[in-house]
Image (cartoon, rainbow, N blue to C red):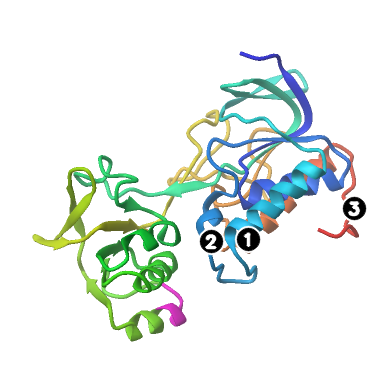
């Protein structure tokens, strides 16, 4: 394990909330570092066309945020966080690369797509089982696919896949969609999207790749299964002192501080966070501002960011 590093603020996660927190901390003149177990950008990285208050391409936006953080002097610790502990007046974030001392910590570890939990899903992950229509849709041109879910992500992904695929089977266990009206209308108007309400996928079939999905006893031949049934907060590594709700999302007070003094939380892994990109960005900034205030630093609100 490497020598201990030391920073004013350590941010856990390099998604929208995490990179926003890093950039905000830099505005206060604080030294900042981040840890990320996966690719920077988080869930937004694989979205080609963002829908909401923040527009653009997810990969390009994430790259811009990352470049601003690096140019501002933040440090990528290139490790996955494994815990947080207190050492006197300081906090220590442990990782597979060492121990990272901090005066404050922002937990922006985000959330991961929930799994169906059915036979064949795990074995065929990245072999046709996917959570990214923009990434994998072009590789399935002319084939049938199955999309599971009834919210914005499921319907938006079904529409992306409809551009490439012969037929998109949209499987939803409920009797009505939860998505925004314009997504529902667009799905209804798409000639190659077949909606199956009150249905569930019970098995993913295939050997070297997805070959079909069993839906209510019927096998639908397909080349891909795209799952959008919600998100699971990535919070298992946190100490018991940091309270979580029934989903595993981190509880905070109004200032976004957790039950562990000096540790703040923001983004998709925080209990009560809205589901839009703009919510994650706003929370990342707010958490960094609260941490900076605790450390006696002032954010330069006039800076262009």
Kindly report the secondary structure that dominates the magenta region of the rendered protein. helix
292 to 47, vertically: above or below: above
Query: Which of the marked residues, 3 or 1, is nearer the chain's N terminus?
Result: 1
| Mark 3 and mark 1: Cα distance apart in space | 21 Å
- Whether residues under marks 2 and 1 lie with C-beta atoms below 8 angstroms apart, the answer is yes
Is residue 31 rendered to the left or right of residue 62? Answer: right
Q: Position of residue 203 (x, y in %)?
A: 17, 51
SS at badge 3: loop
Q: Position of residue 198 (x, y in %)?
A: 21, 69
Within 10 Å of disc 2 (Cα), the crowding (few <14, some 14-19, many 20+) is few
Q: Is residue 136 above or below residue 88?
A: below
Q: SS of the residue at dot 2?
A: loop
Badge 3: how crowded within 10 Å, few (<14), some, or many (20+)? few
Region in magenta: 179-183
Q: Residue at x 43, y 47 (%)?
A: 247
Quarter of the image for the C terminus: give it.
bottom right
Tag 2 residue:
275
Q: Which mark is residue 279?
A: 1
For residue 302, which quarter of the picture? bottom right
Q: Residue at x 56, y 30 (%)?
A: 80
> Dot 3 corresponds to which residue?
300
Q: Is residue 173 visible?
A: no
> Quadrant of the image for the N terminus?
top right
């Amino acid at each position: 394990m490497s020598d201990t590093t030391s920073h004013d603020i350590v941010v856990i996660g390099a998604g929208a909330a995490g990179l926003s927190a890093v950039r905000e901390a830099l505005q206060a003149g604080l030294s900042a570092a981040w840890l990320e177990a996966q690719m920077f950008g988080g869930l937004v990285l694989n979205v080609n066309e963002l829908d909401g208050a923040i527009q653009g391409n997810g990969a390009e936006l994430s790259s811009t945020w990352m470049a601003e953080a690096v140019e501002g002097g933040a440090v990528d610790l290139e490790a996955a966080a494994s815990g947080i502990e207190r050492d006197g007046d300081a906090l220590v974030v442990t990782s597979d690369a060492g121990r990272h001392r901090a005066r404050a910590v922002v937990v922006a570890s985000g959330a991961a797509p929930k799994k169906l939990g059915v036979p064949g899903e795990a074995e065929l992950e990245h072999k046709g089982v996917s959570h990214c229509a923009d990434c994998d849709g072009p590789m399935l041109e002319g084939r049938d696919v199955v999309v599971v879910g009834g919210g914005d992500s499921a319907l938006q992904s079904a529409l992306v896949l409809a551009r490439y695929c012969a037929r998109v089977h949209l499987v939803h266990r409920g009797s009505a969609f939860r998505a925004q009206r314009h997504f529902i209308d667009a799905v209804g108007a798409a000639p190659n999207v077949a909606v199956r309400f009150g249905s569930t996928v019970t098995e993913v079939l295939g050997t070297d790749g997805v070959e079909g999905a069993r839906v209510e006893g019927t096998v639908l031949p397909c080349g891909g299964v795209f799952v959008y049934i919600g998100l699971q907060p990535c919070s298992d590594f946190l100490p018991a002192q940091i309270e979580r709700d029934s989903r595993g999302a981190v509880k905070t007070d109004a200032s976004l501080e957790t039950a562990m003094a000096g540790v703040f939380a923001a983004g998709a892994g925080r209990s009560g966070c809205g589901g839009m990109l703009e919510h994650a960005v706003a929370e990342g900034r707010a958490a960094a501002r609260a941490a900076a205030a605790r450390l006696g630093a002032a954010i330069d609100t006039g800076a262009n960011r």
